[in-house]
Image: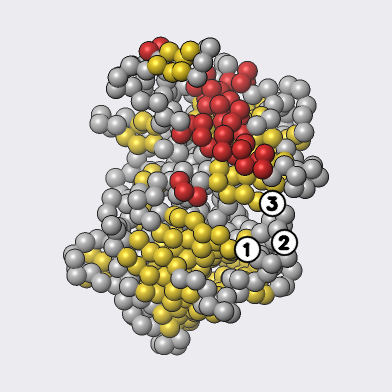
Amino acid sequence: PHGGWHAVHVDPNGPTIVRPPGLALDSGGLAKGLFADLLGRALGRHASFAVDCAGDLLLGGTAGIGRRIVVADPFGGEHLHVLERAAGGVATSGIGRRSWLDEDGRPAHHLLDPSTGRPAFTGIVQVTALAPAALEAEMRSKAALLSGPAAARDWLPDGGVIVYDDGTHEVVEAAVPRVLSASSQGSDSRTRGPPPILGAMSHLPRLRRRLGFLAAAGALCAVAAPAADAATTTNTTSSNWAGYAVMRSGVRFKRVSAAWTAPTVDCSDGQRTWSAVWVGLGGYKTTSTALEQLGTEADCSSGKATYSTWYELVPSLPHSAKITVHPGDWMTASATVSGHTVKLRMADDTTKKVFTKTLHASAIDTSSAEWIVEAPSACSGSSGQFCQVMPLSDFGTTQLDKAQAETAGGHTGTISDAAWDSVALTLAPDTQRFRGPGYPGGPGGPGDAPAATSGGATPSTLDPTGGIFSVNWAASS
């Protein structure tokens, strides 16, 4: 570091900050909460709204409607706690989301000890803070983590959750009740969790389809407010997903399906690249800890292409679907969820080969449905917590057809159906991950590094039926 915080002078009588040459000030640690608060002001007349700026939340509205907030386990287990809040800010800070090994092979992360300028290891790995505003919640969560176990609770007067490096966690009740109802086992409950994983690195990376898309800075904040009868479509950028996702508050999906032609990948440059086409349920929301998906994969290695089929119930590892697929084969796939039972079906209509599988999943997410072309990620660590998006194979153009979703109530429609809203996702390989969910385990988990060199991918607009679109590969600029 060029200097500590003592070298920065703030003029209390005017908007002036003086810093020594070479010392940079990064507003990234505060901007998300500030943006959420500003958007909340514009939405204040709605009956209910939720603003999500890269994991920093602001809730509100005139109707006082409560929303469930899931606090995820940074060690990769089930979620730790569920809060219910109608208004106010929520923010989580953790040392695993942006973490790496330094030049000496020691664990390092982005939260620094102000006294040393080095990564802080205080005995706390994650803090979720509640506050009247998102910016205040963001500051409280960081201050609590950096203060260590002895003083962390002092920074959480409105409540929160502290996760310690021994795998236990503590639910902190609000000192003065506000508009908050936090279900807990008591104000001083510490529950034993999985063993710690900090610094535990494996030398063999594992290729994973990733839970949740990786949001770009240009699409930092997502806003949920009462929707009109007509569906809305928004556009955002991801570092690993291209295609479409659908969701709406209160809607749960039962089934997702689509068809596509297995793409041909160009491996002539001799580079190692990867690509996957899939349909799935869940995994889109920042609080998600599960994703039920299946699809095809087309990779390049040493100038040769390999093609395969797979399925995955995140957070479990992927498995082969045991269908031999060839470029140009017409594929159909569907995932159906009932309770914790997941039924998967994939067919190669060209070769008449069919794969079916019925599984029980302990973690289920049906809050969204997706039709995606993805750049998979290579993950290492004892729970796959250190991940990097891999270069995307040149698949040319892939068209997805017959894209449909069915709700738990039995309504079936295409991507543009008025019963839900859709998001068009453009894959930009230089996008840095700004929000959870971490993988595995949701918000606060380790983040992805963008691919070093890769192509991007862009979805077309939907056809008039709302069930057909294409995804086009493009070389990085």
Tell me the residue at 53%/43% (across/down): 54
The residue beneath circle 3 is 225
| Quadrant occupied by the C terminus | bottom left
Look at the numbered disc 2 and give the secondary structure of its residue: loop
Residue 312 seen in render? no
Alpha carbon distance from label 2 to label 3: 10 Å
Image quadrant assignment for residue 109: top left
Q: Is residue 140 left or right of residue 240?
A: right
Q: Nearer the viewer, residue 242 or 48?
A: 48
Q: Position of residue 101 (x, y in %)?
A: 32, 34
Sequence-first tag of 1 and 3: 3
The residue beneath circle 1 is 232
Give the amino acid at mark 1: Thr
Give the amino acid at mark 3: Ala
Alpha carbon distance from label 1 to label 2: 8 Å
Alpha carbon distance from label 1 to label 3: 12 Å
| Image mark for residue 360 | none
The answer to whether the residue labelled 1 contacts the one labelled 3, judged by CB atoms less than 8 Å apart, is no
The residue beneath circle 2 is 228
